Amino acid sequence: MQNKKPLFIGIALALIFIFFVNGILQYLLLTLLGTEVQDFELTVFGLKPVFQLDTTINIYIKSFLLLSPVALTVLFMEGLFFLLRKSFPSSLRFTAIVVQVLLSGHLIVSVFYGLIELVLVPTNNSIWGKLVELWGLEGSEIYVAVFFFLVVLLGYLQITQKRLLQYLSENKSK
């Protein structure tokens, strides 16, 4: 198999982003927006800053700060698509595709796990539980929010899949 080195590099880059870079970028974003980070926590989903939201911050900014791990992953994935668009079929493109697939899988697992946890235990302390508490959702409103998040996630993943298949078919044809 000639693509072993780019495969291992892609796996390493994805794991580094998931476990460290995402948390560091979230920390920088929180600090930039004036939120005090109290501690760091290493979870299954990576390094995570522990912070208390300031009550004077706008509800939309609070929502963005809570969803920043997901938003940063999506931004990184879009940056990889920019790299894919600018590169020609090579080991760099193969590495970017591997990272893209692994980040998509991480996004699926982390969001689905959080949403399932939210449905089972609506008062949990995850980002989704904090978001529900922030918006004051109760009862069936939580299920509507979960459905909305799932539709958005599945829609984004469908678009991502079509874009990735385009680059995979280019790799096969050349």
Image (cartoon, rainbow, N blue to C red):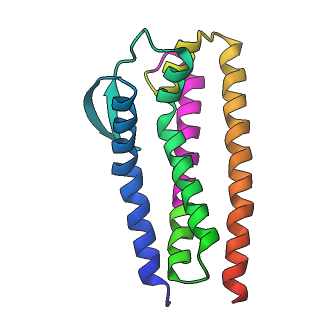
Residue 90: x percent and y percent?
55, 84
Q: Is residue 92 left or right of residue 146?
A: left
Q: Is residue 168 above or below residue 144?
A: below
Chief SS of the magenta region: helix
Q: Where are the magenta residues, as a range?
A: 101-124
Q: Can see residue 117?
A: yes
Q: Residue 50, image x and y in percent? A: 32, 28
Residue situated in front as seen by the camera: 83 or 66: 83
The image shows residue 147 at horizontal and vertical percentages of: 72, 29
Q: Is residue 1 above or below residue 69?
A: below
Residue at 59% in and 39% down: 112
x%, y% of residue 109?
A: 54, 46
Q: Quadrant of residue 14?
A: bottom left
Tag count: 0
Residue 46 visible to an observer of this rendering: no
In the image, residue 88 lies in the stretch drawn in magenta: no
Quarter holding the C terminus? bottom right
- Left or right: where does residue 26 sit relative to residue 106? left
Q: Residue at x 67, y 66 (%)?
A: 164
Tell me which residue sits at (59%, 76%) in the image: 87
For residue 37, side relative to residue 155 (left or right): left
Q: Is residue 108 magenta?
A: yes
Front one among 150 and 84: 84
